Image: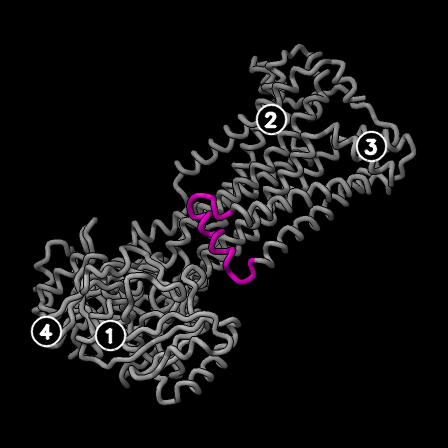
Amino acid sequence: MRATLRWAGADLRAHRGEALFIVLATAGIVASLLLATALFGYATNPWQRVFTQSKGAHVWIHTGASADAGRLASLDGVTSVSGPYRTAAATVESRGTRASVELRGADGERPTTGRPFLVSGRWLDPGTPDGVVLESSLAWALWAEPGDSLVLPGTSRTLTVLGVADSAEPRYRPGERAGVVWAPPSALPRTDGPTGQVIGLRLADPDDTDYAVQRAVTTLGAGAVTQVSNWQQARAEAQGDDRLLGQVLGLFGLGALVAAALAVYGAIGTRIRGHLRNISVLKAIGFTPGQVVRIFLVQHVAFAFTGAVAAAVLMQAAGNLVPGRLGDAVGVWQGLPGHTAALFGVPVAAVLFIAATTGLAAWRAGRVPPVPVLRAAAPLGGPLPGVARGALGLRLPPALVLGMHKAFSWRPRSLATTARLALPLLLIVVALSAWTTIDRFHSKPEQLGLAAALTARADEELGDQRARALLAENPQITAVHPGVEVAALVPGQTGTIALRGLGTAQDPYPFSLAEGRAARGRDEAVAGQGLLDLLNVRLGDWVRMTVGGRPQILHIVGRSIEPENGGRVISTSLDTLRENDPKLQPTLYELQLRPGADPRAIGAELTEASRGRLDVHTVTNPADGLSPLRGVVAGLIAVLALIGLIELLTAIGGTVRESERDLLALKAIGLSPRQITLVSVTATGCTALAAVFAGTALGVPLAHWLIDAQGRSSGIGAGIARAPSPVLLLLFGTAAVLGAAALAALPAARAGRRRLADTLSAVA
């Protein structure tokens, strides 16, 4: 053991650079995995992010106005409270849209517990007595932004929106749950609705919500408590839309883990191959194969442990100082449940994996013969093929020919290096495809099932003809498609689907079709993927459904991209539905706008022009819920780029080391040090080029398959995936190849200037 440790110490002093590289590579990979974990928790659970940042209450209890809600602060298990706040029920109106709200009296300082997290604008100002802050889901429903005015119907009062804030409480639901409006206490007594109080309790044990509610009811009396909500309920509602984010990031996390694992394996294998001469010397002086294996295993486990600990400490101490979304993600992740387990678990798993990888490579090192085998001074990569000899005959630079031959010799080691480098590049291409698909939803929604930007509904007093005439007067509206949408019973009457009649035979609605053709004939329809899966039907089948007690039989001739209702939608023309019910009148109008038009501004104009008899809403874009994914994708690209950089440095080290061993042959054929440097740089650049081609060729179809598979599972359907533009892919590949060549230039130049005496000792 003493001899083993002495040799390990001597080797460390002699190869400080290699040891430092292993430590830094391990630290970089562990930091990458920790960043991926932080990004996953940051993006897949926005509710948890808001709850952590706002120090949310675990239980919200609504009581009557006369209850002494402040007594709940002294209950066992309650660590802090938010409130109590006086409340009043009211109705507010903005741009023709009304919503039931709970006015909540709050002062100019945001509370410590249950602290609303401002998204835009500012908090309440005592100098603005009618200024209010809206909860974000309520603001979205009202189309309200800071600076807008809210009207209280039936009164002459108006409220000015000062800000919009996220809250960890249950969201606003029209007709089911009132939205939260924070207002100065002076604004509450003037409301005519019922009043009360609300208090938020933050518990020492979040799972004790039921017990805390029981104690609260016992303390205040059963008649005093009017409503209770807890954090589990709010989280369940908020997490319903996060499945796609979780799946996408889970896939990237798994890919990053595999790429990091291969990078570690390549780095360790390259280092041990560089010590073959030392291994032979050890065996010659009496070291057994087991001792040789133990030497490298102890060394690399120690390196891995040092790097992993350094990464964990750095991430915990300064991870939140990273600028941009990554720093925000780490800061929030540090307060999420499971943070401590991940902070210890990821480094431990990395060290164990490195130990297993080192054991395999060290076992191979233990089989090295005691007498080193002299390498023949042969051309790099084996005998030159006819193509290379022909290239030399055309007087191409020998350094370029030899470098390309070395990279494209297709030896198992070269193929393995190319494959390891191609994996992170492949994942980056997939990430870029996800980014492009989300951008396409925003920039060209008409290609993804969102031809209309606004939906207008007219009341009975306005009527169909007057509604169409009013809509046609707006110059920003390019097309008005009348229609109806009703709930239909599926065969067997075991569930309901959405049946839509949009457009007419003279002016058909522009559905986005992924398969089949448009519905033009009698009884023809197009259906979403969710409906096809629900009814187990295909294009060309006839479907019978029941609408208001009447049968409706439709022939499915196409599959449309349907972002709404989980794709469980079947659409035909309004004329087809009128054949079954001649008295059917349009109940909604799908409005197409001019490019660049502001849907909210046009909606406000229509509401004002109709004097509130048109209820206008923006069409929900599924990409709105994926907005956080853009910043997260950028962070994942940075993580994958770091892993690719580590693998590239390993490949450069192996290429340069082989060039040092082949230095005699290269000098013998008359190459200068500059040409020898160019051989290594060319080999590295060609390896990167091969990896870029492989990553792009496999990444684009893989991205299409993954995105379309997610579209099918969500009901939207396949056909939504979009690949990055060829220009972007070309820039990406060019940057990767030029970056690889630039990184290889300095170590290759140093190797090309080595003395022949040093070279002889290296090959001996």
Please indicate, yes or no, whether residue 495 appears anywhere in the rendered image. yes
Tag 3 near tag 4, CB within 8 Å: no
| Residue at mark 2 to residue at mark 4: CA–CA distance | 75 Å
Amino acid type at image mark 2: Ala
Q: x%, y% of residue 447?
A: 31, 54
Residue 336 image point, x, y percent:
51, 60
Q: Residue at x 44, y 87 (%)?
A: 218
Dot 2, how many residues are within 10 Å of its Cα: few (below 14), some (14-19), or many (20+)?
Answer: many
Label 3, residues with CA under 10 Å away: few <14, some 14-19, many ≥20: many
- Residue 511 or residue 53, whichever sits in front: 53
Between the residue at mark 1 and the residue at mark 3, the CA separation in whole angstroms equals 78 Å
Magenta residues span 319-339
The residue that mark 1 highlights is 100
Task: Give, as a three-letter code, the residue at label 3.
Answer: Ile
Query: Label 4, on which residue?
Result: 463
Q: Which residue is pictured at 69% across the width and 25% down the height?
A: 658
> CA gap, disc 3 to disc 4?
91 Å
Magenta includes 333?
yes
Kindly identify which residue carries mark 3: 279
- Tell me the CA gap for discs 2 and 3: 28 Å
Amino acid type of disc 4?
Gly
Asked if disc 1 and disc 2 are in contact, CB closer than 8 Å, the reply is no
Q: Main secondary structure of the magenta part?
A: helix
- Does label 4 or label 1 sit earlier along the sequence? 1
State the image quarter where residue 470 is shown. bottom left
